Image (tube, grey):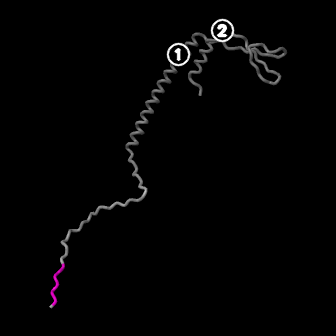
Amino acid sequence: MISPYTFPLLLAVLACQPAVADPIYKWVDSKGRVTYSSTPPPGGVKADQVTTPPPPTAEQVRQAEEQLKKTKEQASELENERLKQEEKEAEEARLRAEQQTQPPAAAEKPTYLRQPSYYNPPLRPPLRPTPRPLPK
């Protein structure tokens, strides 16, 4: 993806170029390679002169700078919104994690716990041995 700053930066660089530029020549050599150069080609080679667009005007540079400023402000606003959204999502995730019950820890070996008794029969007095009659 191309950065939104590329176009205004390109315009600024083009504005810094001198108004008078050397002509640019384009030709194809015997191997079929296309060559661009500011010096004329060697003798006997047909060359085309490439026309370059004029540098941007002061008004175009000013507009590019304004656009760059607006783009930077918009990027800053979007970054702030993104950070706020991430904070909100992190807080919601933290609250969800707190609300979830923790699963019980698994024991490595089974542990048997004594279960409480819900029925307790009434206590009876201990049985006394009955006296036996004495032999005669």
Quarter of the image for residue 51 reads: top right
Quarter of the image for residue 24 reads: top right
Mark 2, secondary structure of its residue: loop
Residue at the location (29% across, 61% down)?
Answer: 116
Residue at the location (78% across, 18% down)?
Answer: 27
Q: Position of residue 60 (x, y in %)?
A: 58, 13
Q: The magenta stretch spans which residues? A: 129-135
* Rendered view: 126 above or below 97: below
On residue 28, which mark appears? none
Q: Position of residue 26 (x, y in %)?
A: 76, 17
Residue 132 among magenta residues: yes
- Give the residue at mark 2: 19
Q: Which is more N-terminal, label 1 or label 2?
A: 2
Left or right of residue 108, residue 24 in this image? right
Residue type beneath disc 1: Glu
Q: Position of residue 84 (x, y in %)?
A: 43, 30
